[in-house]
Amino acid sequence: MKAPGQALQAQLLARSFFEASPETVAPRLLGRILEHRTASGTLAGRIVEVEAYLGPHNQPPDPAAHAFRGPTDRTRVLFGPAGHAYVYAIYGRYFCMNISCELAGRAGCVLLRALEPLTGLEVMARNRGLLSDAPARNLTSGPSRLCLAMGLTRAGQNGVDLVDADSALRVLDDGWLPERIVTTPRIGLKVAMDWPLRFAVAGHACASGPKRMRG
């Protein structure tokens, strides 16, 4: 694990990485790094759990996706170029972050469900209202937890280009790859509950309910 404040040796992902279907991009994102350069320092975590949400052009369309009914003011970023942050609010106070996929006009995205904290752990703990020695799993396991820890909000990060070298929020590749990936249905949905579009690094402590995940 990287020490807080230690620079990451990693390469910025290209936009072409995200210009594919969400179910293709999602497992490939596992092991990549989400980095947020903030006034309090650099925060970074390795992506260890994700879910894919398909665009309305998919056959059949994905009824659980925000893009299901076409572009709106809320979801417009999903229909634009790939590699942008789509951040939305839940319960009026928390946020979830997705990354747009597909070519412009063909919406799709990947929801970030869990990170392994790498850099800036003390700041992450403070953002979460936890003690500085809180377990890594408690910092960034779960989509709203990771947004709190990483300082991500709809007002601040929605629409940010994640593959722009000058962006404060980026997705990086340091060459690390998971030994095994597990696939399960998505979590907490009332429709399309059996679609196998949740992917995680097998057995990782920061993934949601690793004991329940099957290969």
Image (spheres, rainbow, N blue to C red):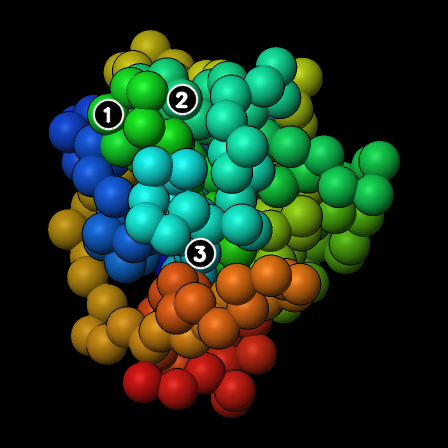
Name the residue rendered at 15%, 29% in the picture: 16
User: Residue 180: which numbered mark, if any?
Assistant: none
Q: Name the residue tied to disc 1.
A: 103
Asked if residue 10 can be seen in this view, the reply is no
Quick one: SS at disc 1?
loop
- Give above or below for 185 relative to 126: below
Q: Name the residue tied to disc 3.
A: 51
Q: Give whichever of discs 2 and 3 has the lower sequence position.
A: 3
- Give above or below for 29 relative to 160: below
Left/right placement of residue 83 relative to residue 49 reads: left
Q: In the rendered view of the protein, which quadrant contains the C terminus?
A: bottom left
User: Residues under labels 3 and 1: Cα distance?
Assistant: 19 Å
Q: Residues within 10 Å of mark 1 (few under 14, many from 20)?
A: many
> Circles 2 and 1: CB distance less than 8 Å?
no
Q: How many marks?
A: 3
Q: In the rendered view of the protein, which quadrant contains the N terminus?
A: bottom left
Mark 1 residue type: Leu
Q: Residues within 10 Å of mark 2 (few under 14, many from 20)?
A: many
Residue farthest toward the top in the current orientation of the protein: 166
Q: Give whichever of discs 3 and 1 has the lower sequence position.
A: 3
